[in-house]
Amino acid sequence: MRARAWACVCVAALAFGTAGLAACGNTGGAKFSIGQKAGEMPSGESWAGVYYNPVYGYLHVIDQDGNIVGRWKRTDGSHWGELSGTADGNVMHFTWKEHQYGAIGPSAESHGSGVFVYTMGKNEGGSSPPPPPELAGQYALDDSENIGDWHCVKQLNMKPDLSSINGDNPTTGSPPQTDQWK
């Protein structure tokens, strides 16, 4: 009788454990609503450049041996990130990692995937010169179905410099010496 009770407990534990794992598993990740079908890259344009977003700051992008790579530093200086992906015409699919300055452990880094669609700026009213190109973007954390928007505007007079963004602490120099011990 005792063996039968243990067998029932083991079967129940296995059944609940499997159901729990299925409930916590990845359901396929985010389904982006843009970038489903690539179009032609606009004539004379390239992915390489610097793009600006008010939250994520300047995104520096270059083409590196057929891969598109980029780095950014948030405008508030709290995080920096890197992305890598491939482009098909005017659509780029990428993976990304974002690091929080001064943090350690699992919460110090976020990662996920995303998509950018390269578009020419909307020229409403026939302004001259025409507006700069834009990136319509979406991103998601790994194992998440929640999608965020990442819209950027290309900065025409800036050259990308990946080495300008790294894990170095953004605080430079020592604090000002206003009070001194006597």
Image: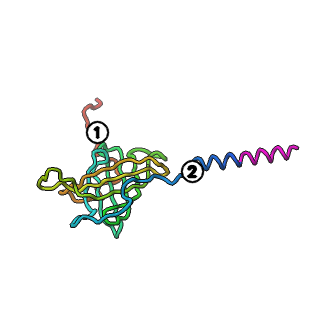
- What's drawn in magenta, residue-wise? 1-13
Q: Amino acid at mark 1?
A: Pro
Residue in view at x 26 percent, y 51 percent? 52
Report, in whole angstroms, how far the alpha carbon at label 1 lies from the one at label 2: 47 Å
Residue 171 in view, yes or no: no
Image position, residue 12 (x, y; %): 73, 45
Residue in view at x 85 percent, y 47 percent? 3
Q: In the rendered image, which residue does mark 1 sit on? A: 175
Label 2 crowd (10 A; few <14 / some 14-19 / many >=20)? few
Q: Quadrant of the C terminus?
A: top left
Q: Indicate left or right for 85 with 145 as reference.
A: left
Task: Compare marks 1 and 2 and give the one earlier in the sequence.
Answer: 2
- Vertical arrangement, residue 174 with respect to residue 49, above or below: above
Question: Which secondary structure, mark 2?
Answer: loop
Q: In the rendered image, which residue does mark 2 sit on? A: 25
Check if residue 10 falls in the magenta segment: yes
Q: Quadrant of residue 118?
A: bottom left
Image position, residue 145 (x, y; %): 47, 48
